[in-house]
Every structure is written in C-alpha cells, then in structure tokens.
Image: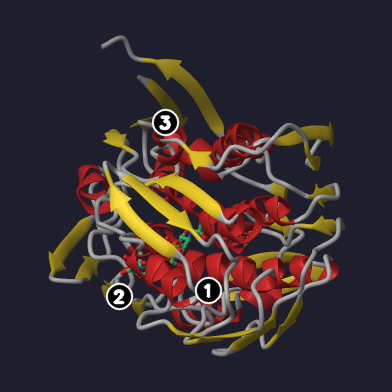
C-alpha cells in the first residue's frame, strides 16, 4: 500500500502554479465524442482521473495523443464501441459523462452503473430521467445502463429537481446534437459547466444562459473540431490558499482563478485571512496575528464548494474558538474527521454539521486518505503538524492533484513516498 510521508512544520515558501481543472477537463474530453473532426485540448492536468478518461475514450474508439505536455489531440479512429465498461467506470464516477455524448452521437450507449463511493451513494437517476425526457429508451440491468435513441434525441424541457454538475454537463452534450430546443432549468452554474459550454460553442453548438439557472440549447446537426484551453482548477487553488495562509502568506499562487473564488475569499476574510493580489493572476494569503472561528455551509456554486470543505476543516482545527462546517451536498463527506482527530484535532459531528474546537497544534500520526479532497486535507494537516505524518491510500490524491509531491517539495516541504508491505 503506497503512502506519503510528510515531515511537518518545515518553512514553506515560494511560487506554486495552479494546473488545469480536473472537473472541466473531464467533460471537455467526453465532448470530443460529439465531433468527427479532431479536437485539441490544452492545459489538461496530468492526473489519474484524466488517464482513466483517456483509457475510456480509447476503448470507445477515439484516438487520444498527448502531443505536448498537457496538450492532447482527440480524433476518431476505428469503428466506435458503444460501451463504457465496469473496470473503467468503477475507477471514476465521472465516467458517466460519456453517456450523453455517446447517445447523441452514436444513438446508443451501454455504460456501467457507477457504484456508491466513499462520500455517499451518488445516484445518477437525474441524468437518466433527463435523457428519457429527451426521448431515450433506458433500462438498467446487470449493473449496466442500456440507453438508445434510434431516431435521435429530441429537445425537451428539463427541470432538475436537484442541482447536479455532471448531470447538467451530460444534458448539455446530449442537447447540442438533439433535434430542437432543450431548456435546462435548475442547471448547475459551476465554472466547469461554463467551460464545457464555451468549448461546445466553439464547436458550433448553440447555447445560451450557461452560468445561470436556465440554459437554452438549440440542437445542431453536426459539431466541428476546435482547440480549447481548460480553465485553472479552483479547488487546487483554494487548497493552496489555505496553505499560503498557514505559512504566513509566504506561498505565492500563480495562475490563481480569483473570479471563481469570490465566496471563498469572503470566508477567508471572516477568518482573518486577506487575499492579496501581487501580480497578474498571482495571490498570497496574509493571516492576521490571531485568526477567528467561522461557520461554513457547503452549497452549489457560487457559494462554498463541498470540494474545499475538508481542507478548510484542517485550517479551522487550529483556529482558536469553535467553528462549524455544515455539509449540504453529500451525505457522507466527513470521513476525514476521524483522521483529523488522530492528528489531535477536536471535532464532533452532529448530523450534517462538524463542530470544531480549535487546538494549539496538530501532531503527526498515521492516517488514511479516505477520498480525493480528504487526502488534500491530510496533506495540509501533515505539513503543519509537529513530527511525521504518514498518509495511506494516497492514490486518491493522485486522482486530483497534479504533481503534488513536486509542487510541495519545491516550496520546501519534506515529502516522500513509500510502500508498506501488507
Ligand atoms: C461534481 C464534481 C465533484 C463535486 C460535486 C459537487 C465532477 C467530475 N465532479 O460531482 O467534484 O464534489 O460535483 O459540487 O465534476 N444527485 C442525485 N441524483 C443524480 C445526480 C446527483 O441525487 O442523478 C445528488 C448527489 O448524490 C449529490 C448532489 O446531487 O448529493 C450533487 O451531486 P452532483 O452535482 O451530481 O455531483 P457530481 O456531478 O457527481
């Protein structure tokens, strides 16, 4: 079992560059299914989840070539396969993103049902209901979603009963090639959804209203190729903002997507941390001498992202006073709490709220990375803790943080990997 070992309390300083957004790159990669012509994607982060999506697209029949670091060309090769197999879907839930595009382009798709995951059951019922409303015939059998639309998808009014990011993205892709107009109500407004819409529009899709509650899509017959550069990762940026503050503003964050983190900045300011712009897209985070506790609630964009909840909880665990973090998006996203407690944090969970009583310091221990963002929380904790922290199940981190060991080492951290024999 691979682990990451961190010697805590080293002085971190220097410049770190934010990579392309995983959650924008994944739907944009899926969208390459929609065109016959080659598509070039730039600023694609080098991550495990991106490799999984690449494998999935290759399985489906798309040729994927990395022409330069972070720059990929996608072109249609052999006859397409209509199947997204379980081995790949089970590695990454976001594989469901190929469903809408495959159905629109090939009129048929067989996609393994993503199972539960550590942060909750995470069903895909809303994706399926919406596609059915667009005329798809869908059955779920033997762990697979079988979907077909032999005469093509038809535009429809989709009213999502709950805001869903990948659900909105799936329908955007399906609607781009459907016949007639699709109206997506209660759509997700996340910057990654907007990035996908921007790419689809460059390919010739007719989309309006992305970034608002209601998106209008007028289907076209064909989409063309394009070149598109993926937006920076706001979650990685927010993670380094926390680190910058914990190391007295000595970490400079480059390519920082300020516009996507406005609400997060409000919370940081409440805690006593000031975002300071020091150059073109460069930020540091200056803490006041004594920080203040805060109450955070996760909510869909533009509010506080669930994907930054665990990292902020680590920060709050060393802020004097009582803070709370309420998780409203996923039902089981406090798996990092017992791990933080192993490092000395004082946290109690009451239903969907974690009550955090700030302690003086954390102390190194052996912990587990329970999911992607929890693993980032453990890394932050290890960097500020006294002594050595060993984080097991570190593959979660590699799913979503590019070159994290390198980025941290460059800042002066002592991090190393090892294998624990079972
Ligand atoms: C995306 C992000 C993930 C982020 C999450 C919430 C990607 C690849 N992943 O995940 O990093 O944490 O948004 O911001 O972009 N739901 C249903 N039925 C459905 C779909 C969703 O009940 O068919 C529920 C989910 O269980 C959850 C809520 O809706 O409680 C929001 O989930 P959703 O926005 O769909 O998350 P993902 O798109 O999977």
Q: Is mark 1 within 8 Å of ligand 1?
A: no
Camera-side residue: 382 or 44? Answer: 44
Q: Residue at x 24, y 54 (%)?
A: 337
From the viewer's perspective, tell me whether residue 144 is left or right of residue 204: left
Residue 61, image x and y in percent? 67, 35
Q: Nearer the viewer, mark 1 or mark 3?
A: 3
Image quadrant in which the N terminus is located: top left
Label 1 and label 3: CA atoms lie apart by 49 Å
| Residue ID for mark 1 | 288
Q: Report crowding for label 3: few under 14, some 14 to 19, many 20 or more residues within 10 A (C-alpha).
A: few
Q: Would you name the residue on which mark 2 appears?
A: 328
Q: Residue 353 sits in which quadrant?
A: bottom left
The residue at 79%/32% (across/down) is: 65
> Do the CB atoms of the residues marked 1 and 2 lie less than 8 Å apart?
no
How many labels were placed on the picture?
A: 3
> Mark 2 vs mark 3: which is more N-terminal?
3
Q: Secondary structure at mark 2?
A: loop
Name the secondary structure under disc 3.
helix
| Pair 2/3: label in front | 3
Which residue is identified by label 3? Answer: 87
Instruction: Give the alpha-carbon distance from disc 1 to disc 2, as whole Å.
Output: 29 Å
Task: Judge left or right: residue 422 versus residue 113.
Answer: left
Image quadrant of residue 339? Answer: top left
């Amino acid at each position: 079992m691979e682990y990451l070992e961190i010697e805590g309390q080293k002085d971190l300083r220097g410049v770190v560059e934010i990579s392309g957004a995983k959650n924008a790159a994944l739907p944009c990669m899926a969208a390459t299914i929609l065109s016959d012509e080659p598509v070039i994607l730039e600023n694609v982060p080098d991550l495990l989840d991106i490799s999984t999506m690449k494998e999935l697209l290759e399985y489906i029949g798309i040729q994927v070539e990395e022409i330069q670091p972070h720059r990929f060309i996608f072109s249609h090769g052999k006859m397409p396969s209509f199947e997204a197999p379980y081995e790949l879907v089970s590695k990454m839930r976001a594989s469901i993103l190929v469903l809408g595009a495959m159905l629109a382009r090939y009129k048929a798709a067989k996609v393994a049902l993503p199972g539960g995951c550590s942060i909750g059951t995470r069903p895909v019922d809303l994706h399926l209901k919406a596609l059915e409303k667009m005329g798809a015939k869908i059955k779920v059998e033997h762990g697979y979603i079988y979907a077909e639309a032999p005469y093509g998808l038809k535009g429809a009014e989709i009213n999502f009963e709950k805001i869903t990011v990948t659900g909105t993205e799936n329908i955007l892709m399906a609607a781009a090639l459907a016949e007639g107009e699709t109206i997506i109500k209660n759509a997700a407004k996340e910057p990654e959804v907007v990035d996908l819409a921007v790419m689809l529009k460059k390919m010739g899709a007719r989309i309006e209203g992305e970034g608002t509650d209601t998106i209008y899509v007028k289907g076209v017959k064909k989409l063309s190729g394009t070149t598109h550069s993926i937006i920076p990762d706001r979650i990685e940026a927010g993670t380094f903002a926390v680190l910058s503050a914990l190391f007295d503003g000595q970490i400079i964050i480059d390519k920082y997507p300020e516009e996507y983190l406005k609400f997060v900045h409000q919370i940081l300011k409440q805690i006593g941390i000031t975002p300071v712009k020091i150059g073109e897209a460069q930020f540091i985070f200056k803490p006041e001498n004594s920080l203040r506790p805060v109450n955070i609630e996760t909510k869909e964009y533009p509010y506080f992202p669930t994907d930054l909840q665990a990292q902020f909880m680590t920060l709050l665990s060393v802020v004097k006073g009582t803070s709370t973090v309420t998780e409203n998006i996923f039902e089981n996203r406090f798996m990092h709490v017992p791990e933080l407690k192993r490092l000395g944090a004082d946290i109690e969970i009451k239903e969907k709220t974690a009550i955090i009583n700030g302690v003086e310091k954390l102390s190194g221990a052996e912990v587990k990375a329970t999911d992607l963002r929890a693993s980032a929380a453990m890394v932050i904790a290890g960097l500020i803790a006294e002594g050595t922290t060993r984080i097991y199940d570190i593959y979660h981190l590699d799913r979503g943080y590019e070159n994290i060991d390198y980025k941290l080492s460059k800042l002066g951290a002592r991090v190393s990997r090892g294998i624990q024999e079972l």
